[in-house]
Amino acid sequence: MPVELALEFFASLESLPELAAGFESLRRSGQLERAAGEAEVFSGREALDAVEADWRAIEREGALSTPFQSFAVAAASLPAHLAHGHEPQIITVRENSETRAILPLVMTPMAGARVLRFFGDPLIQYGDAVLSRAGTDAHLVTALNAAATLGADAALFRKVRSDAKLASVLSRRANVSRVEEAPFVDLRRDVSLPSRDARELRRYRRRLGEHGEVKLHITRGSDALSCVQTALELKRNWLAAKGFASSVIGDEAWESVLTSLVTGHANLLACARLEAGGRLAAIEVAITHGKRWHAFLGAIDPAFAKCGPGQVQMADTIAHARANGFAAYDLLAPADAFKRVIATGAISVRDHALPFSLQGQLAARALRFAPQAKSLLGRLPAPLRSAAKSLLRLH
């Protein structure tokens, strides 16, 4: 089996001449882009402090695309990056003495290459630049040109929404390594579930009701800390039982980011806890931003697994969000069958790889193979699977 998998992997890679040609094409396309402003790079653990004032000023404009680009999330993520040996590389672009764009990145090792990734990755569920109201694509081009000078082999821009600030520039300059969908519920519309799914939800609710009163509790700030800790524990146990791995869940440094967002930034994170007869049945940890509720992490108590607690919790949380003035309930990527049933729409989310060297081009092509590699690795014996995941950093 390992030999067959290795042959399948190498068969998927393209020839070196094609890789070099692809890199040259990307280099020429970058030269044709119009740039604006002057770039400055801040490196190391002090980089975030150096850009804080400008970053927060752009936030006050209401210009952030998602909560994952907030300074609060970046500040909470810094200790985790440093714990993993990631080096902050934050690029600012100024014009007429005003900061127009901030591209927050970290330099990380990946499969033998030096790769730039979004600040906050892998925790953040949407990646983007921080662009002021006066910022343009030309300012983002300047930021990307500066990124190419930092000594990285490639930049991996994960989970970029099709409406992100960076989306149009990356679509012209970078390879797409993965495409997913992020479903959402438009809470301004009064849309009912299909009759079959509505019946199923009522059946689940009756089953939960056999254990006692079914009730949803919403908490924030320090009141939500124990709820978030319980959600993380349940998710860790579920991953272990399924034999899955996560870059965030089970990683002490990244889990600490979530708990710090609860205690240090009370208005950013919320916890929805569904109880049946006073016992925990399901939990959702959400990150809120303006009028959008982002369903970040969900977990259930296995004792209630046959009662559909996750579906009931989501239905009740959607009702809570609608009643409290939220405009959208974002289910995040990837889409699954249940998400598609309850969603009223979806937006595409892409991983982009931008190579800066031949080695980076190889890494970019390998990233396109990553989803298939995960499937293949799942067929390996457990010891080999763990070793391969560690080597390729696919978990």
Image (cartoon, rainbow, N blue to C red):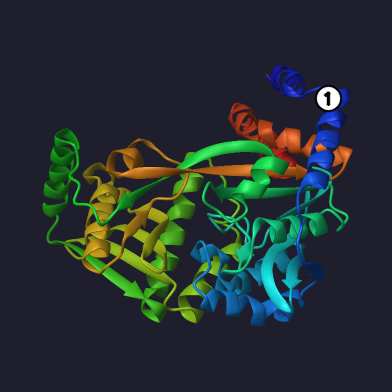
The mark total stands at 1
In front: 127, or 204? 127
Query: In this picture, is 217 found above or below 310?
Result: below
In the rendering, at what x and y percent does residue 287 appear?
A: 43, 65
Residue 107 shown left or right of residue 220 in the figure: right
Which quadrant does the N terminus fall into? top right
Quarter-wise, where is residue 194 in the image?
top left
Residue 368, above or below 33: above
Rendering quarter of residue 45: bottom right
Tell me: 109 left or right of 58: right
Q: Which residue is mark 1?
A: 18
Is residue 260 toward the left or the right of residue 9 in the image? left
Residue depicted at 54% across the width and 63% down the height: 68
Quick one: SS at disc 1?
Answer: helix
Give x and y (percent) for residue 237.
46, 51
| Vertical relation: 388 (above or below) 118 | above
Q: Nearer the viewer, residue 15 or 172?
A: 172
Q: Residue at x 32, y 73 (%)?
A: 219
* Res 221 quadrant in image: bottom left
Badge 1 local density, few (<14 within 10 Å), some, or many (20+)? few
Say which residue appears at 74% left-offset and 69% top-offset: 92
Left or right of residue 100: residue 261 = left
User: Can residue 279 be seen?
Assistant: no
Q: Position of residue 46 (x, y in %)?
A: 77, 78
Amino acid type of the residue tagged 1 in the rendering: Glu
* Residue 285 % position (x, y): 40, 62
Q: Is residue 4 above or below residue 237?
A: above
Q: Quadrant of the C terminus?
A: top right
Viewer can see residue 112: yes
